[in-house]
Amino acid sequence: MLRYKRLLLVILFLAALLALFQFSGLREHFNLAFVRQQFVDNRVTGLLIFVVLFSIGNLIQVPGWIFLAAAVLALGKTWGGLATYLAASISCVFTFLTIRLIGGDAIRAVKNRYARKILHGLDAHPIKSIALLRILFQTVPALNYALALSGVRFRQYLIGTMVGLPLPIMVYCLFFDYVGRVLHVS
């Protein structure tokens, strides 16, 4: 049981953080309209607010597409995509460092053959594995938690994240730009 102590600490931290945001009413502000309005109202500070909201949202399980859609609808597909890439990268780093600080490499303590097989694959090709995971799952918080707890080096995590995020962000930018034009959202 002692080997799972750090994993339990991460779970308790995330549960407490989620409860804080849920019961304080702050989670209600993490929606498409609110995030988009921050860009519209605050052109100068909107990007900073966007990065902070994206980073907190990633920790409390707010889907990244909400932030991407808000950025595209407020700034257009090019600038919205660039803002999202910046915010998503910072958000992933923030989540990684926070979870790593609390949980260390707790997944390494799990005695499961599937977990060991996955970790072996991650260890063999960390950058390529992380880039592929980013292409498939973008900024999904559970992926950030797992990678932080996997013991992968920060440098490898950062490179894999920076390489893997652009493709799905570009695809989503085109999609949300199209939806915005069809629905006449400006």
Image (spheres, rainbow, N blue to C red):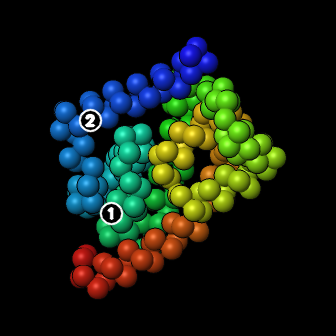
At x 31% / y 67%, what residue is drawn?
Answer: 74
Residue beneath disc 2? 21
Relative to 104, is 115 above or below?
Answer: below
Relative image position of residue 23 (x, y in whole percent):
19, 33
Other residues around mark 2 within 10 Å, as few (<14) / some (14–19) / many (≥20): some
Of the 4 image quadrants, the one containing the N terminus is: top right
Relative image position of residue 84 (x, y in whole percent):
46, 59
The disc, 2 or 1, on the residue closer to the chain's N-terminal end is 2
Instruction: Farthest residue to the right: give it.
Output: 124
Residue 61 or 181: which is nearer the viewer? 61
At x 45% / y 59%, what residue is drawn?
Answer: 83
At x 58% / y 14%, what residue is drawn?
Answer: 2
> Which label sits on residue 70?
1
Relative image position of residue 32 (x, y in whole percent):
27, 60
Q: Circle 2 sits in a helix, a strand or a loop, which is it?
A: helix
Q: CA distance from mark 2 to mark 1?
A: 21 Å
Residue 163 or 43: which is nearer the viewer? 163
Relative to 184, is 133 above or below?
Answer: above
Which image quadrant for residue 11? Answer: top left
Q: Circle 1 sits in a helix, a strand or a loop, which is it?
A: helix
Residue 12 or 52: which is nearer the viewer? 12
Residue 138 relative to residue 11: left or right:
right
Residue kind at label 2, given as amino acid type = Phe
Residue 156 in view of the camera: no
Residue 145 in view of the camera: yes
Residue kind at label 1, given as amino acid type = Ala
